Image (spheres, helix red, strand yellow):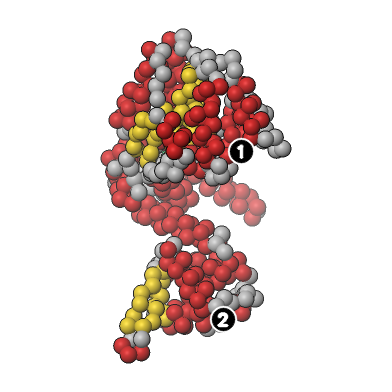
Amino acid sequence: MEQANARTKMAGSMRNMRDHAVILNRRFLDDEQLIRSEQLAVLEEIFNTNVRDREMREISCHFAPVLRRDHPYHLALWGKSGTGKTLTMIYFLNFLAEMCRKEGIALRYVHLDLTTARPCFRALNDLACLLNASKRYRRGISLEELMGRIEASLEAYRGYLVLFIDEVDNVRRDRDTFLAFLVRRLPQQIRAKLILVFASNRLNWSDHLDPRTKSFLKLNELVFKPYDAIDLQRILQIRVRKALRPQAVENGVVEKIAALASREHGDARKAVALLARSAHLAEKAGCSISVDTVDEAARQIEQDKYTTMIRTAPVQLQAALAGIIEGVRTKRADLVGSGEAYDAYRAFCTRASLRPLTGRAFGDLVTELDMYSFLRTRVESKGRYGRTREIVLDIPDGLASTIYNTILLNFDVSQQASD
Ligand SMILES: Nc1ncnc2c1ncn2[C@@H]1O[C@H](COP(=O)(O)OP(=O)(O)OP(=O)(O)O)[C@@H](O)[C@H]1O
Ligand SMILES: [Mg+2]
């Protein structure tokens, strides 16, 4: 009987979730997790060309000579994270390839995505794979041989070759060698008309380049500005239409996310992530997305950022923060003197079986925590008793507890005795 009851309840709640689902199509909330071909299909539907109109026009202008069989310069795209550089360029290149096919112009493009940092050899190896010059990551061959293979694979090709080098500043070792190959050597070795497109979120990535490469590098530059609130509203509206049940989004939600995101960073990726998190929360709670849901989602994302950061931080940094939180709690104030903080840190180290660092090294850890905005320090004058450094926790109470518990779990120690 009880079992039957449980089954009825489960079926009821699943039906309820189905009928009140908030998210109807997850692909449109998570486009970056899709495989490339699917991503292009999603992109076609979500990319609002009005939003990046100016950039799209400039890129079209840059590539227009291709239609006259002329050879455009190279292109560099700058802009902060999430301003649409990758998306805009992929969208455009796809369109250009299609157009060239219709006009009978040979054009190939490859997207070398360097989102995670890698040395020159690895980056060239990835490029070789994209060009079918190598099947997989190869060790034990020289850089020279690798370059030779890339050149050999392009020997017969005479059309346009667009190499989109995304996040070029992530080539960490031998960046000069990497760029010298692309900018100086490759064009001389192959017959294809090479057009390089670089994207980066560091404006100054080319400052330290080898001057010889730099003088070869004829670049047109294009800056992507952060999205403003109106842009973000448009971007989000498309997602809402494509991914969510229309009645599940209350008035003011899109405006709120756009306002938060444009005020803080103008990053569309983060704005979409906030919409996605709000949708997940609402779905779990079985209600529609309200402005309050957005607040809660923003709070959670912020919290995740801090806890991830501290979970992966060096153990001494974690111990320092745990000590400071304990010091603040013991004092029942929102600040603690650096001497007391050091004592609390040492006590924590003893419990965690960690060798405490000297007071001076602890001071460096405090400075680092300040840099990551976990706390603030200020120097207080004590008149003729000199000056002391005071530490103020710069995170809300709830978050401090979550971080503290995360650290305890990491060290496998129990709460402070006075708690
Ligand atoms: N115009 C837009 N329309 C729809 N979605 C967009 C738009 N611009 C950005 N996005 C969203 O933001 C995400 C990030 O965009 P994109 O990858 O182009 O940024 P980026 O400038 O290359 O950032 P990064 O410097 O971090 O690589 C996209 O996957 C997409 O979800
Ligand atoms: Mg990008």
Is 183 on the left-hand or right-hand side of 411? left
Residue position for label 2:
347
Task: Give 181 or 51, whichever is nearer the viewer.
Answer: 181
Residue 121: numbered disc = 1
Outermost residue toward the bottom?
384
Circles 1 and 2 in contact, beta carbons < 8 Å: no
Question: What's the residue at 52%, 48% (across, down)?
Answer: 13
Question: What's the residue at 41%, 13% (across, down)?
Answer: 69
Residue 332 spot, x, y in % from top left: 42, 81
Residue 370 spot, x, y in % from top left: 42, 67
User: Is label 2 in a helix, a strand or a loop?
Assistant: helix
State the separation of the CA atoms marked 1 and 2: 47 Å
CB of mark 1 near ligand 2 (< 8 Å) = no
The three-letter code of the residue at mark 1 reads Phe
Residue 316 lies in what quarter of the image? bottom right
Q: Is residue 32 above or below residue 418?
A: above
Question: What's the residue at 47%, 83% (across, down)?
Answer: 340
Residue 355 spot, x, y in % from top left: 62, 76
